[in-house]
Image: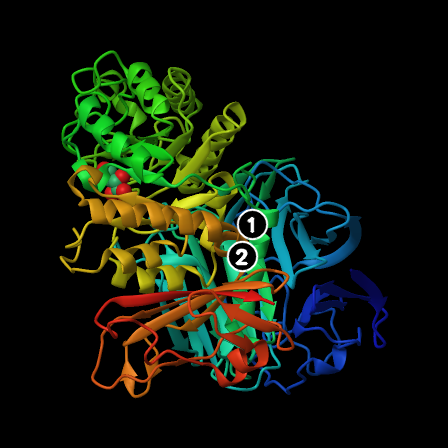
Amino acid sequence: MIRITSHSLTGEPLFHLRAGDASYVFCVFHGFLLHLYCGPAVEDDDLTPLLVKVGHDSVVPRPADTPEGWFSLDIAPQEFPVWGTGDYRPSALMIRCADGSAATSLRYVSHEVFAGKPAVDAQPAVFASEDEADTLAVILSDPGSGVTVRLLYTAIRALPAVIRRAVVENPTDSPVTIERCASASLDVATWAEPAELLHLWGTWGRERTVQRTPLAHGTVSVSSRRGASSHHHNPFAALVTARTTETAGPAIGLSLIYAGNFEILADTDPFGSIRFTAGIEPTDFTWRLEPGESFVSPEAVLSISGEGLGKMSRTFHRLWRRHLCRSEWADRTRPVLVNNWEATYFNFDSEKLLAIARDAAACGIEMLVMDDGWFGTRNDDRSSLGDWFVNEEKLPGGLSPLVERINALGLKFGIWFEPEMISPKSRLYDAHPDWALGTPGRDKSVARSQYVLDMTRPDVRDYLFETISNVLSSANIEYVKWDFNRNLTEAASATLPPERQGEVMHRYVLGLYDLLERITAAYPHLLLEGCSSGGGRFDPAMLYYAPQYWTSDDTDAMERLDIQLGTSFVYPASAMSCHVSASPNHQTRRVTSFETRGHVAMGGAFGYELDLTTLTDEEKDLIRRQVADYHRYYGLINRGDFYRLILPGDTVNGKTGGCAAWMTVSEDRSEALVTFVVIRASIHPVYFLRLEGLDPAAKYREESTGAVTAGSTLMRAGINLTSARRGGWTDGSSVVMHFTRI
Ligand code: GLA
């Protein structure tokens, strides 16, 4: 719902967006768009009394046409601050006009309201019907240059989520250059208590580690300049207070639907107002806007919670599942797969794959995925990317006979690609050296012996579409793992003029979207899984196309606790691809029981990644049971509400890092699945677990013990797990408990 009134002082419009149980309020004040409130719902519209009126000294400038007194853009809480006219904090927008000047001043012109959420362009975006959302467009203009900005706000009716983006339009007759353009910005001016930025950092094998950074006066930012959203920081941060926990306190989560360079910053001014901004990272970014053209920013999503981080996460989960992920697989039950990467690496042929497939079929596994190494002359990672034709030495007769035999075993078949890359040792590079990104006269940096294709070029994308289509049409291929194993360097394109080279990083991402759009439109039934050396580009933009993403190359179950629970801050279980791999684990050499590896991998889209032909009969039996369990609990795991109960870094009974726990509850609260893992056992352990999300008035039966307990007891007093495991608790031991309402 969007309520538009006018405020008492100036009569200018006041906008109150109600999204779920949250309010987002801002107003026009002397033509400027000022932010008033973002948090749990409030009833009043006119929150202008919340505007901070501090006296400022004479050195702080004021727009000449505003009344003398307290008003200053450097102090006022703003909605979309611009550069050069007296707000010295980080700007949301900076444009350079044809005359070289960069000072702009955005003033309110008009607004429009729409039911639903109109599509703006082909970038990944939240979708919602006319019954599900309301959209407000506020049009602003810079009187000096004539450039206009449309700020789009969508309030989702059933969820406390507000979606924002900015569209910069150039109706003038000279070009302008955008040097910085955020997707969303808000100034949180009323918290008046210690604030923190929660964000997810990482690197290869350690994706999405949770960190809370206290905000001090100055700027704290997380970003990627790698050409991809990256392992290093996820395009997400949450503004929280020091007292915010999983279940209490304010949290404003800000997630950018973008697969490229991003920056999310929190800047605290001298009066304690926190500017929270997300958008494209401005390093090496410029965008030339010709007369009549417009530039559309990526979308940013605010998940607004007054009840802690758990609720913030659950809002993101529902939004992504219901309003972002477009695949027909978004809510469909995905097949349990086995991937041959950690089983064989590059060393496989048809017979080896068939041997794995035979064991997979006998264990109830539903799909075989053939990973890297099936094309060109690729027997290691030093060649052939770009040469997307089958290596018949490994797969005699091509894909079709192999896939037919795998299908005959009752298994689906999936395949690996790394479309955006080119090996210097490839037929493609011999034919088209200029198709790789690179600066003329400079060496190209190599990573994993490969270069990056110039995805800004339509001819490159046509080639990829054609060659990938040829493979996909050559056999019954029902799944693709879309990998991306290096970041961009020397990001220049042979086809763009000098003044547009600053556009390459963003055009690359738009080119990637274009190719993904074409592939998903041509193969609508394909199950697409994203991957980037593990989870290096695990972001909402990729989830728009691919309903699941390979969470990390680190498949160690204990490490996966950090990675998967960290990922859960923004992404639902259904998006996290999680596999049972070999023990000792290939990354950490840690030994973990088959049972626990299964329990942890069931935290997401479930599968296996080990050589099934080497397993004992007992282990194969366990796989049969795990697959059956996963099928039984599929809806709960992938469509339920997710609660983090104990994070691996929490202190429980004086021990830090000793255990972890999470649960999912069906939407109607009739069922719950609880997983508890002991990471490091200790002498005389005492474990209690308080559950969440149940119906307090109902009684629940736990499946394995038959115990019947009231929801209120399970949630308030908790359950005693001290002796819940037969044989006692050892390092890496776990239990899964299934509760049903009676
Ligand atoms: C990346 C992926 C792995 C695997 C290899 C193949 O590292 O994350 O899962 O596909 O590439 O080269």
Q: Amino acid at mark 2?
A: His
Q: Which residue is mark 1?
A: 321
Out of 637 and 479, give the one closest to the viewer: 637
x, y percent for residue 707: 48, 74
Report the image quarter containing ligand 1: top left
Q: Which residue lies at the image location 48% right of the left edge and 43% below the top edge?
A: 547
Q: Which residue is mark 2?
A: 317
Left or right: 664, with 173 as reference point: left
x, y percent for residue 220: 41, 71
Local packing at callout 1 (Cα closer than 10 Å; few below 14, some 14-19, many 20+) is: many
Q: Is residue 717 above or below residue 455?
A: below
Quadrant location of the C terminus? bottom right
Q: Is residue 299 above or below residue 329?
A: below
SS at mark 1?
Answer: helix
Local packing at callout 2 (Cα closer than 10 Å; few below 14, some 14-19, many 20+) is: many
Left or right: 162, with 68 as reference point: left
Out of 350 and 362, give the one closest to the viewer: 362
SS at mark 2?
Answer: helix
Q: Which residue lies at the image location 37% right of the left edge and 23% below the top edge?
A: 407
x, y percent for residue 230: 35, 51
Q: CA distance from mark 2 to mark 1?
A: 6 Å
Left or right: 372, with 704 as reference point: left
Q: Residue reaching furthest top? A: 397
